[in-house]
Image (cartoon, grey):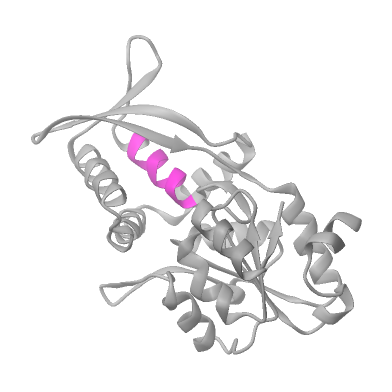
Amino acid sequence: MKEFIINFPVPWADVHGEDIIFDMDGTLVDGDLGETVFYRSLLDASAESSEDHESLQVRGQPAALLTSYRESIIQGQLTKAYRMVAEWLDVLPAETVASAAREILEANAAPHVIHVMAQNAAGMHVHELRYGARLKADMQRMIETLQQWGARCWIVSASPQMICEMLGGVYNIPDERVLGVRSQNGSVHIPWHLEKVMVLKEHGVTAPLVAFGDSVGDREMLCFARHQVVMQDGDPALVREAKEQGWHIFG
């Protein structure tokens, strides 16, 4: 408990009945669970081990999708990239996606680099992918303690809804307080930047007590809360801003 008192911005008793908001990937999870499930699904759809067993190959549509996704990430077109992930995973059986997420978390592997060769009609591309995700034990204890004190914990993430709900189950956060990427009537709704604030308001959250985040995409959500907590191992730009603003840094 002592370590949390040092890092938490308000007295524990003050959280009763209050909304506490958490980003998912990088905040509750070490690594990016949504992205790792996406990579796993592409590898499962078209994968071959190389002769030296140190790299993997994908072909056809998975190869084209992987290359397009990586190009979007590199170019900073993150909304486009998140939409690709959601649309690809939406066509897979829900249990397939949930099973992949569970297996990744059960492996409890720290994010590490894997090399994937993507080959299709457009040519060959070699990608270095950050693969793996594991629960942050300190955040598990944090949420458990907050819930014991009567806080309403929320997850708001740009990862697909079904993956967010699976993680919410691990943290005993009900589905109605888990807000991820949703597809509806042919359009994809992505909680990202200001959209994180908008989706919270749509669900009746108007003045959260504390928000936790790790990336610049969480900035608006952090500012929306009365107290801000930034993960120490988060985006360096956000950590610098947190120090400048006097926000709490966790870790």
- The image position of residue 40, as x and y in percent, is 41, 39
Quarter of the rendering containing residue 154: bottom right
Magenta residues, start to end? 34-43
Residue 1 seen from this side: no
From the image, which quarter does the N terminus lie in? Answer: bottom right
Residue 79 seen from this side: yes
* Residue sitting at x 56%, y 58%: 240
Magenta region includes residue 37: yes
Residue 155 sits above or below residue 19 on the image: above
Residue 102 sits above or below residue 224 on the image: above
- The image position of residue 174, as x and y in percent, is 65, 71
Q: Is residue 96 left or right of residue 8?
A: left
Q: Please name whichever residue, 177 or 222, is drawn nearer the observer in this view of the structure.
A: 222
Query: Residue reaching furthest front?
Result: 244
Quarter of the rendering containing residue 247: bottom right
- The image position of residue 27, as x and y in percent, is 61, 56
Q: Please name whichever residue, 60 or 137, is drawn nearer the observer in this view of the structure.
A: 137
